[in-house]
Each structure stands twice: as C-alpha cells, then as structure tokens.
Image (spheres, rainbow, N blue to C red):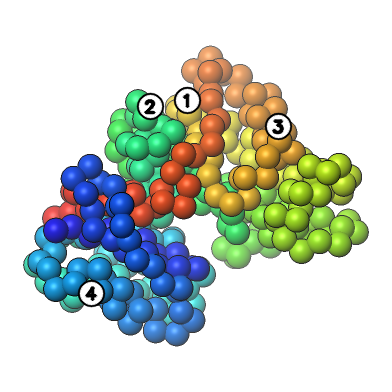
C-alpha cells in the first residue's frame, strides 16, 4: 500500500493511493499552531490503519529541500527554520520509500496526468490564493531545480510594486495578485470589504475600486505568466486556487496582458486555462509521487 501526504499551512491531508496515482478517499486535519508533526504522524497512522506501507508521496508548502528531505514552509511557524519531514515519515513507516516535492510542483504533475494539462508535457501551473504558488512540468517530469523549489512564480518581481513580501523581499507578484494583497490594495483606495470573495463579487457588480484591484492583479499575473513561458518554453499555463475563481474581472486582464507580452514565435500560442482538479490537485500529485517512492 502507498500513501499520499499533502501538508499546507491550513490543513494536512493523507490517503491511500490507487494504481493510477489518484487518492479517491482521504482524511484531513487542520494544521495546528503547535506540534504540527504530532498531528501529521497521527494522521498517517490513522490512514494506514495498521497495514504495511511501501511508499509515501509527500507534497509540502515551500520552501523545501528535496535533496535533504527538509521543509521550511513560511506559514508553519514551528517548521519555518527547517524540519526533517522525510526522516519523520520514515520513523512512522521504516520500510517505506519516500518522494518529496513542493506543493506547487505536485499540483502541476497532477494537472499533467489527470487534469487540464493532459497531453501537454510542458506546462506551468499556478495556485492563486492566499499566496501564489507554482510548479513546472517539462518533458512530463517535475522540473525541480537545485533544491526542489523551481516554480516559485509568486516571487517573480511585479513591475511597479515595492510592497514588502512575506518572503523578506519586496515587490513580488504575490504582493499584487494574491487574494489578501488585492484586498489590501482595494482597502487602501477606500473599499470597505474584507475578503477576496467580497472583492470578486464587488467587481462583478461594477464596484470601481474592486474592478481596479482585480484588473491590477490580473495584469500582473498575465505579465508574469508570459515571462515564465518565454523562460521555460512552455505553451500552457494552468491556473487554480481560490482567488483564481474571481471570474472575468481577473481573467480578462490576465489574458490580455499575457497576449500583449507573449509575442515570441514559440509562445505565440500560449494557452491559459483553469485547473480541473481543484483542491484535490496537490494530494493527487503526492499520490503520483508515491508511485515512484524509493527507500
């Protein structure tokens, strides 16, 4: 039996992996403020239910170090300076192989095999939500980079932004186009709402500030996608995440900006499409990783 494990700042999920890498049944728990590993280990043991585990695919919020098996997610305080996650999983299942990837990379792999990227072995995936994550598939395989962090598109620089970012830098795409950042900008302009969902509803209803905020966010996203496509030579970008559900006020400026910038012949046909797997994408990617897990 093989297991998939998805760890994010909000929740942890785990389930048994089917032969095609999907995870049809899973369990989840909120990510606690204290002792996140204790909660994670208990979740794994509950899902395994005493059965032999041969492999575990792990997707975790980044940064990660897939070579060392260490994760340092910004939004899990106890792990932010580094936690030996692979060693932890092996302490629960000593005979199991493991495979670790950044959550955005796992989501990209899942969309390639089972979602909007089927049949497109070179693609970029974005998760636009509280933050902006990403992953890259090249030649049908995750592009990992030196430490496993390739795909952090949320930390490309957004032209014109000088806002501080949670990563410690300034002017990252995440400071313009994530849900909380768009809300923050709108409120600085006099908008009175509080959430990304309210902002999207306001934009669809014609609220001028909400429209401007989503236009600003979408334009920055489209420019970043076009830039990444030129760098990576991909012809498909798959966009998921809660804030990506904001509809035409976000998508139309995003598509317009991407078309304006993606002018080189090899990316002239760049397609930007919604993700198909939704919240199951990252866990499905972990399931696919589990199929390749080795000791």
Q: Tell me the CA gap for discs 1 and 4.
A: 41 Å
Q: Is residue 38 left or right of residue 204?
A: left
Per the rendering, the mark at residue 120 is: 2
Nearer to us: label 1 or label 2: 2
Q: Depth check: 109 or 274 in front?
A: 274
**Residue 100, percent across and down?**
28, 57
For the residues labelled 1 and 2, say whether their Cβ atoms are less than 8 Å apart. Answer: yes
Furthest-bottom residue in view? Answer: 34
Disc 4, SS = helix
Nearer to us: label 1 or label 4: 4
Disc 3, SS = helix
Per the rendering, the mark at residue 45 is: 4
Furthest-front residue in view? Answer: 25
Residue for point 55% across, 30% down = 272
Q: Earlier in the sequence, mark 3 or mark 2?
A: 2
Nearer to us: label 1 or label 3: 3
Q: In the displayed structure, would residue 33 be above or below residue 233? A: below
The residue beneath circle 1 is 235
Per the rendering, the mark at residue 27 is: none
Q: Earlier in the sequence, mark 1 or mark 3?
A: 1
Q: Tell me the CA gap for discs 4 and 2.
A: 36 Å
Disc 1, SS = loop
Residue for point 65% across, 24% down = 259
**Residue 217, percent across and down?**
71, 45
């Amino acid at each position: 039996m093989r297991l998939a494990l998805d760890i994010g700042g909000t929740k942890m999920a785990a389930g048994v992996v089917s032969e095609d890498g999907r995870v049809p049944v899973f369990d989840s728990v909120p990510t606690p403020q204290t002792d996140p590993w204790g909660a994670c280990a208990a979740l794994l043991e509950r899902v395994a239910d005493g059965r032999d585990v041969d492999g575990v695919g792990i997707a975790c919020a980044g940064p990660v170090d897939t070579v060392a098996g260490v994760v340092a997610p910004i939004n899990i305080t106890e792990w932010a300076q580094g936690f030996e996650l692979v060693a932890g999983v092996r302490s629960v299942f000593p005979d199991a192989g493991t495979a670790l990837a950044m959550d955005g990379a796992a989501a990209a792999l899942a969309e390639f095999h089972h979602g909007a990227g089927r049949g497109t072995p070179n693609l970029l995936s974005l998760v636009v939500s509280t933050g902006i994550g990403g992953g890259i598939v090249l030649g049908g395989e995750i592009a990992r980079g030196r430490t496993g962090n390739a795909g952090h598109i949320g930390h490309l620089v957004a032209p014109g932004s000088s806002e501080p970012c949670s990563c410690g830098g300034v002017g990252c795409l995440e400071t313009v186009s994530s849900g909380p950042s768009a809300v923050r900008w709108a409120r600085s302009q006099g908008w009175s709402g509080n959430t990304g969902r309210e902002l999207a509803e306001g934009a669809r209803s014609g609220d001028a500030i909400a429209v401007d905020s989503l236009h600003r966010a979408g334009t920055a996203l489209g420019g970043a996608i076009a830039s990444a496509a030129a760098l990576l030579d991909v012809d498909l970008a798959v966009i998921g995440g809660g804030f990506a559900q904001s509809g035409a006020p976000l998508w139309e400026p995003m598509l317009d900006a991407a078309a304006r910038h993606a002018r080189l012949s090899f990316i002239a046909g760049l397609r930007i499409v919604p993700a198909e797997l939704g919240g199951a994408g990252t866990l499905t990617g972990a399931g696919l990783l589990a199929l390749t897990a080795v000791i």
